[in-house]
């Protein structure tokens, strides 16, 4: 069972539909701690501001459940867009601490070319770091294109945690992988065949 965590933010219906299209046999949207704990995998979607996201998680009482699932049970967790940023320790966008599952900070784009608009919005190709291997990268290469909408990006302390990069004025991390923790800054649920492949790869991950 894959649970899409409902903490009050995120494009949950689109994620649910894309997962079903990718072949997920049992997927649901839930805020029930018991359902989350007994899932095989969970997805943390999110759209909006960092502090708003963390405040909603804290107020929902789900933080302890999420920490237990990710850090004790060590089952696959996927954060999407804001959900990826919440995996980091903190953000320049706010004052609250993040989940801290990835040794990283979320920072605002600081563009060398002021002709580039913020937020970074639209389709962009990803870059697969050399020698990076993961089931998540099956049929994903440097020509794969994903849909982005964001003004902040995650900066990892450890290069080993970088799964994919993207170029928008600068090279930035657009997907992370640390043990069972995965984050995607782009929206796979809006990325057509490339997003569908990424969800298939997530479904295929061992639990």
Image (cartoon, rainbow, N blue to C red):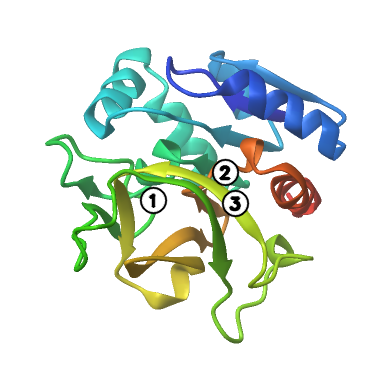
N-terminal of the two: label 3 or label 1? 1
Looking at the picture, does residue 134 appear above or below residue 59?
Answer: below
Q: Nearer the viewer, mark 3 or mark 2?
A: 3
x and y percentages locating residue 117 in the rendered image: 28, 49
Q: Nearer the viewer, mark 3 or mark 1?
A: 3
Give the spatial CA distance, label 3 vs label 2.
20 Å
Q: Is the C-beta separation of discs 1 and 2 under 8 Å? A: yes
x and y percentages locating residue 159 in the rendered image: 40, 76
Dot 2 falls on a residue whose secondary structure is strand
Q: Is residue 32 left or right of residue 96?
A: right
Residue count near mark 3 (Cα–Cα under 10 Å), binned few <14, some 14–19, many ≥20: many
Q: Residue at x 37, y 14 (%)?
A: 60
Q: Is residue 31 visible?
A: yes
Residue indicated by mark 1: 101
Q: Residue at x 29, y 70 (%)?
A: 157
Residue indicated by mark 2: 77
Q: Is residue 37 left or right of residue 65?
A: right
Q: Residue at x 19, y 68 (%)?
A: 112
N-terminal of the two: label 1 or label 2? 2
Looking at the picture, does residue 41 appear above or below residue 156?
Answer: above
Which quadrant does the N terminus fall into? top right
- Disc number for residue 146: 3
Q: Is the C-beta separation of discs 3 and 1 under 8 Å? A: no
- Disc number for residue 26: none
């Amino acid at each position: 069972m894959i649970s899409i965590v409902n903490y009050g933010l995120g494009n949950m219906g689109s994620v649910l539909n894309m997962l079903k299209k990718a072949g997920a046999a049992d997927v649901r949207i839930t805020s029930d701690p018991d359902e989350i704990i007994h899932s095989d995998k969970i997805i943390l979607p999110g759209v909006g501001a960092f502090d708003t996201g963390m405040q909603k998680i804290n107020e929902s009482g789900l933080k302890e459940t999420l920490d237990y699932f990710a850090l004790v049970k060590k089952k696959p967790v996927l954060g999407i867009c804001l959900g990826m940023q919440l995996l980091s320790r903190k953000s320049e966008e706010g004052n609250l601490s993040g989940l801290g599952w990835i040794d990283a900070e979320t920072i605002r784009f600081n563009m060398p070319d002021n002709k580039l608009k913020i937020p970074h919005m639209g389709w962009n190709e990803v870059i697969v770091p050399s020698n990076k291997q993961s089931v998540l990268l099956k049929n994903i290469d440097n020509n794969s294109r994903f849909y982005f909408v964001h003004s902040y990006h995650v900066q990892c302390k450890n290069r080993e945690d970088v799964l994919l990069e993207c170029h928008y004025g600068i090279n930035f991390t657009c997907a992370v992988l640390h043990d069972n923790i995965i984050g995607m800054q782009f929206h796979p649920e809006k990325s057509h065949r490339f997003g569908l492949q990424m969800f298939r790869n997530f479904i295929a991950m061992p639990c």
